[in-house]
Amino acid sequence: DASCALRPTVPSRREEELKLLQLTEDGRIALTASSSTFAALKGYVYQVRGTSVDEQLREICMVFKIDAQKRAQAGLDRRCGSCNGVLQSVPKDQVVDQIPAITASSYDEFFVCSTKACARIFWHGGTYKEGIRDLRRIVDD
């Protein structure tokens, strides 16, 4: 039946466990909220106990001693918020004709998404500051 071929396949629990184990072999820490996955891979994964995203973020930062504010600031300057492409720092004169005049007069540091289909321009304006403020609120609670 042709319709069966179009159905997405759901990975088996074992396939998921093998992927998590591969992460640990690559020097990464795998996270799971599943008690059964944690039981199957004990010693190879960390079980996140928080139920909300805010709780999980706080927990992971505390357990792994991550400076979330510092990481977020660096991350927001590296990855596009729209397509996850790599951001490149560019001089103002390279983007001045593509941004509002008030933005050009207010900011000196700009980033452009390197994905040609996206090519969005970013700066440390209100959205950036709001994201950092939200993260600080979550982590400091």
Image: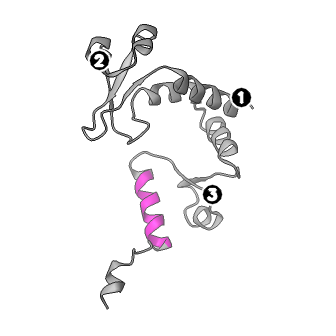
Q: Which is nearer the eye, 79 or 40? A: 79
Find the magenta span and give its range. Answer: 13-23
Residue 22 lies in the magenta stretch: yes
Q: Main secondary structure of the magenta part?
A: helix
Q: Distance between the residues labelled 2 and 1?
A: 39 Å
Query: Which three-letter amino acid code belongs to the residue tagged 2?
Result: Asp
Looking at the image, the residue that sits furthest to the bottom is 1
Q: Residue at x 62, y 65 (%)?
A: 39
Residue at screen point 47% across, 72% down: 14
Please give left or right for residue 128 compared with residue 99 in the image: right
The residue type indicated by label 3 comes to: Ala
| Viewer-side label of 1, 3 | 1
Q: Which of marks 2 and 1 is in front?
A: 2
| SS at circle 2 | helix
Residue 120 in the image: state x and y as whole percent. Answer: 35, 32
Look at the numbered disc 3 and give the secondary structure of its residue. loop
Mark toward the start of the polypeptide (2 vs 1): 2
What residue is shown at x 58% (from left), y 65% (from top)? 37
Residue at 67% from the left image edge and 42% from the top image edge: 54
> Mark 1 and mark 2 in contact (Cβ < 8 Å)?
no
Residue to which mark 3 is pinned: 33
Q: Is residue 41 above or below residue 9?
A: above
Asked whether, in this view, residue 8 is left or right of residue 13, the answer is left
Mark 2 = which residue? Answer: 97
Judging by the rendered image, the residue that carries numbered circle 1 is 140
Q: In which quarter of the image is the C terminus?
A: top right
